[in-house]
Image (spheres, helix red, strand yellow):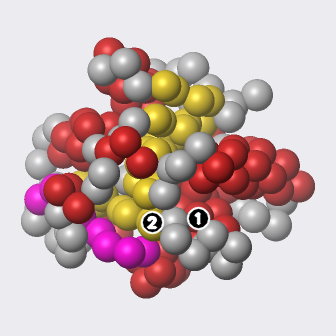
Amino acid sequence: MGTIKQIDSACAVGFTGHRPERLPGQGNPDMPETQKLITALQDWIEKAILRGKITFVNGLMAGWDILAAEQIIALKKRHSHIQLVSIAPYSKNFFGREKCWTPEWKNRAKEVCRQQEFGIKIAEHYRTGIYFERNRTLVDCSSELLCYWDGGKGGTQYTVQYARSLGLEVHNLFS
C-alpha cells in the first residue's frame, strides 16, 4: 500500500465514470462499442502523457475505473515511465457488497491490482459516505479528471462537480 503523499498532483489524472451497465457494451472489451471507447480512451491518455501526465489514478470499481486502468497497463508497454495508482474505498468484503462484481469484473480488478504501482485504501470496512470520500481523495490528488459521464445523477456526477469546484479540467468521453 502506498500513500497519497507519493502522488504529484500536477502530473496526475484521475478517472471517474459509470459502472458496467451504463458503459457502451457494458465495458466488455470484445464488444465493438466498447472498442470504440477504448480507442478514444487510449488516444486521450497518449495526449495526456505528451502533456507531462505520468500518474493515472482510478477508484478501482467495476466499469469505467477498471476499463481505464487496463488502458494504462496496455500503454505502459510504450510508456514505461507512467504509473497506475488505485484508490479503493475499503478493503474488507470489497467484492461482496456491490452487484457489479461479477466473476469477470473481479478478475479484471485483481489483474489491475497486480500491475499497478501501488494501491491506497480509504478504510478497512464499508461505511456510509465512503465512496464520496474515495472520490474526493481521487480528485484531491489529481490536476485533471477524465470521466465517462452520461449526465445522470450519482457518484460520477458528484465527482465531476467536486473536481470543477476545485478548478480541475474535466474531460468527458461520453458521446
Which contiguous range is marked in magenta?
116-123
- Relative to 93, is 73 on the left or the right? right
Disc 1 element: helix
Query: Helix, strand, or loop for circle 2?
Result: strand
Q: Which residue is at a point 76% across and 49% down the rendered structure image?
A: 43
Q: What residue is shown with label 1?
A: 72
Measured as percent of width and height from the top left, residue 22 is found at: 62, 40
Give the left or right position of residue 111, taking residue 74 as reference: left
Q: Is residue 91 above or below residue 158?
A: below
Indicate the amino acid at tag 2: Leu
Q: Residue at x 62, y 30 (%)?
A: 172
Residue 61 lies within the magenta run: no
The secondary structure that dominates the magenta segment is strand
In the rendered structure, are the residues bearing label 2 and label 1 in contact, judged by CB atoms less than 8 Å apart? Answer: yes
Where does the N terminus fall, quadrant-wise?
A: bottom left
Where's residue 143, x and y in %? Answer: 39, 36
Q: Hey, what amino acid is under mark 1?
A: Ile
Task: Say whether residue 75 is left or right of residue 149.
Answer: right
Q: Which image quadrant for residue 60?
A: bottom left
Residue visible at 23% across and 61% down? 6
x and y, in percent, of residue 67 in the image: 60, 59
Mark 2 crowd level (few <14, some 14–19, many ≥20, 10 Å Cα): many
Q: Based on the displayed image, in which of its 4 quarters is residue 70 positioned? A: bottom right
What residue appears at the point 51 percent right and 66 percent down from the top-left corner? 82
Answer yes or no: is residue 35 visible. Answer: yes
> Does residue 155 appear in the picture of this structure?
no
The numbered disc on residue 84 is 2
Q: Is residue 120 magenta?
A: yes
